[in-house]
Amino acid sequence: MADTLNSTTLECLRRETADNPTASVIWLHGLGADATDFEPMVPMLDIQASVRFIFPNAPIRPVTINGGMEMRAWYDIDPGAPLAGGEDIKNSVAAIRSIVAEEIAAGIPSERIALAGFSQGGVIALELGLSHNQPLAGIMALSTYLHDHEQITERIGLANVETPIFMAHGLSDPVIPITRAITSREALIGLNYRVEWHEYAMGHQVCPQEITHISQWLASIYPN
C-alpha cells in the first residue's frame, strides 16, 4: 500500500512489500521525474523480506541545461561547468541523510537501509552512500555516474567500504554515455569497493532484464 507524507525536508511516497518492514530502500528519481517514477516497479521485485520503499520528491529548481526551466532536480546541470552543481548535491545529500535518520529512529538499523537512484538520483545515492558514517545495506546506481570522481577520496568514509554497490547502464545511453559510468566504476574498484556491474542494450532507461537483476541483488542484501 502506498501513501505520501512529509519527511524532515522532502515529500515522500512510501510503499511496503509486507507488514512490519525490517528493511528500507530509499530510491531517488532522475531529472524532471518525481516520486511516482519507480514506485510501480515494487510489485515486480521478487523479495521475500518485508521492505519499505521510500521515493522522495526532489525540489523544484531551474535547470541550466534545459534553458533554466523549472523542474524537479536534485541539482542543477550546467554543461559549461560540470562541477557547478556541487552545492546542490551537498544539500540533496543532507536531505536524504535526514530520511535515513528517520528510518533508523523508526527501528530500521542502518545496515538494513539501502540507497538507490536513477541518473541524477544515482549521483546522490553514491555521494551519500560512500560518505555515510554508518554501514548501509547497499547502494544501487542506475544509469548514473560518480560526481567529481577525481576528488572522491576527499569525500568518502570508512563505514561503507564493504557495502555492495550495484551499477547498471545502457550501452546506447544518449544522456549519460556509458564511458562516464565505466570511469566511475573503475574509480570505485580502484578504491576496493565491491561493484556488481551490468550493461544492457538500451538507452537512458530501465529494461526488463535489469529489473530481474535488481530483484536478485535486493534479495541478496535482504535475505529472508
Image (tube, grey):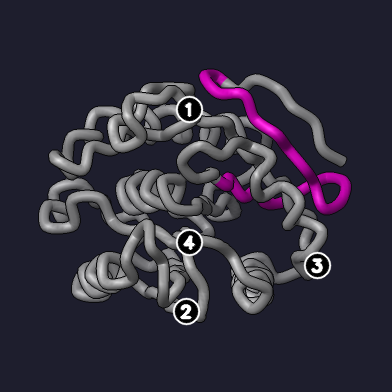
Element at badge 4?
Answer: loop
Q: Earlier in the sequence, mark 1 or mark 3?
A: 3
Q: What amino acid is found at the position of numbered circle 1 in the picture?
A: Met
Q: Viewer-proximal residue, 183 or 101? A: 183
| Cα separation between marks 2 and 3 | 23 Å
Instruction: Count every numbered label the image shows and give the total.
Output: 4
Q: What amino acid is found at the position of numbered circle 3 in the picture?
A: Gln
Element at badge 3?
Answer: loop
Residue 181 locus on image (x, y percent): 31, 67
Residue 57 locus on image (x, y percent): 57, 31
Callouts 4 and 1 close, C-beta under 8 Å: no
Q: Is residue 37 above or below residue 56?
A: below
| Cα separation between marks 4 and 3 | 29 Å
Numbered tag placed on residue 48 in the rendering: 3
Residue at x-position 82% and y-position 37% = 2
Nearer the viewer's eye, disc 1 or disc 3? 1
Q: Earlier in the sequence, mark 1 or mark 2?
A: 1
Q: What amino acid is found at the position of numbered circle 4 in the picture?
A: His
- Residue 192 in sight here: no
Q: Name the residue tied to disc 4.
A: 204
Element at badge 1?
Answer: strand
Nearer the viewer's eye, disc 2 or disc 4? 4
Q: Name the residue tied to disc 2.
A: 198
Q: Is residue 162 above or below residue 16?
A: below
